[in-house]
Image (cartoon, rainbow, N blue to C red):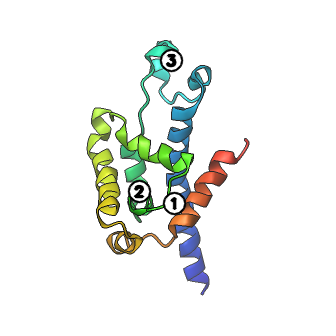
Amino acid sequence: MGVRLLILLALLVGVLYCLHLLVKDYQALTAPRLLRMLFKRDTNSMNESISAWTPHVRWRMILHHDPIQCARYLYCELGATNIKHTDLQRGFVYMLSLEPKELDRTSRDVFLQAYNYGATYKNGGYCRNEFPYCPFDYTLLFQLIEYLINQKD
């Protein structure tokens, strides 16, 4: 029993880090123009003006830290959801439409494929079968995302 709990906690830490990366990129995209300088992750581009900043998502890093496929499962469920999306959910879908950097292109395509898979079948059960390694439910994942976004540092 104790070993299973430790494994589940380790998985949760990995999923939280992956969701943390998604949330940070989402916050960088939705931040007011002036605050975008605070969310810059690349110190080499600090000399650029705020208006020259182009939003991007670190798909490669997110995919690298998603071995149990929870982020892919999340995007599959976003595609499969028949209910009207919240602003937060629409924001995460919008992240797929942004032009990725060359390094992130193939990784973004993995998430886009997961979203399209869910949109094709319109059933969360298919998403669960496609990404069976994620031990967490879609609603729990979005509750964690909402918590991370609303958390004040």
Total marks placed: 3
How far across and how far down the image is residue 132, in percent? 38, 74
How far across and how far down the image is residue 74, in percent? 45, 60
Question: Mark 3: which amino acid?
Answer: Met
Element at label 1: helix
In this rendered view, identify the residue nearer to me: 96 or 64: 96
Q: In the rendering, which numbered label is found on residue 75?
A: 2
Q: Earlier in the sequence, mark 2 or mark 1?
A: 1
Residue at image position (38%, 52%) is: 64
Q: Say few, some or many: other residues with alpha carbon within 10 Å of mark 3 (under 14 / 14 to 19 / 20 or more).
A: few
Residue at image position (31%, 47%) is: 107
Residue at image position (42%, 41%) is: 95
Specify whether 41 is left or right of 108: right
Question: Mark 2: which amino acid?
Answer: Tyr
How far across and how far down the image is residue 55, in percent? 44, 29
Which residue does the numbered mark 1 point to in the structure image?
15
Which residue does the numbered mark 3 point to in the structure image?
46
Farthest-out residue, right:
152
